[in-house]
Image: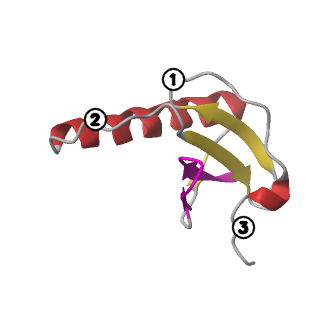
Amino acid sequence: MPKFYFHFSDGRRTFSDTQGVDLTGFGALRREAVRQIRDMKAAQLESGMHGSWPDWTVTAVDARGAPVLHMAFDLTPKPLPARDTLPAGPQN
């Protein structure tokens, strides 16, 4: 089963996933990205913080670090970023 990593960014900071998630395909990948976005938003609301999400995106990369999904926090797809703009992938 392929492993994917989800990196979050607000355009200034990037939060890198170093653990990854094993997923069965693109449908599962998209559902996981949506779940993680919703979890982040819910956690912020539960903590009493009311931030702004328009600049936030999630980029999913495969085990080689190649981007396979790029989505805004309003759940709209975005063009895939250049690989060299993403955090370094896991070292095998």
- Residue 51 visible in image: yes
Q: Is residue 89 above or below residue 56?
A: below
Query: Is disc 2 surrounded by few (<14), some (14 to 19) or many (20+) residues within 10 Å?
Result: few
Q: Is residue 41 magenta?
A: no
Q: Which residue is mark 3?
A: 89
Q: Is residue 1 visible?
A: no
Residue carrying label 2: 42
Q: Residue furthest bottom?
A: 92
Earlier in the chain: of badge 1 and badge 3, it is 1
Q: Amino acid at mark 2?
A: Ala
Please name the amino acid that badge 1 sits on: Asp
**Figure check: 84 above or below 35:** below
Decide: marks 1, 3 in contact (CB < 8 A)?
no
Within 10 angstroms of label 3, few (less than 14), some, or many (20 or more) residues? some
Please report the residue visible at 52 percent of the width from the left and 40 percent of the height from the top. 56
Amino acid at dot 3: Gly
- Which mark, residue 74? 1
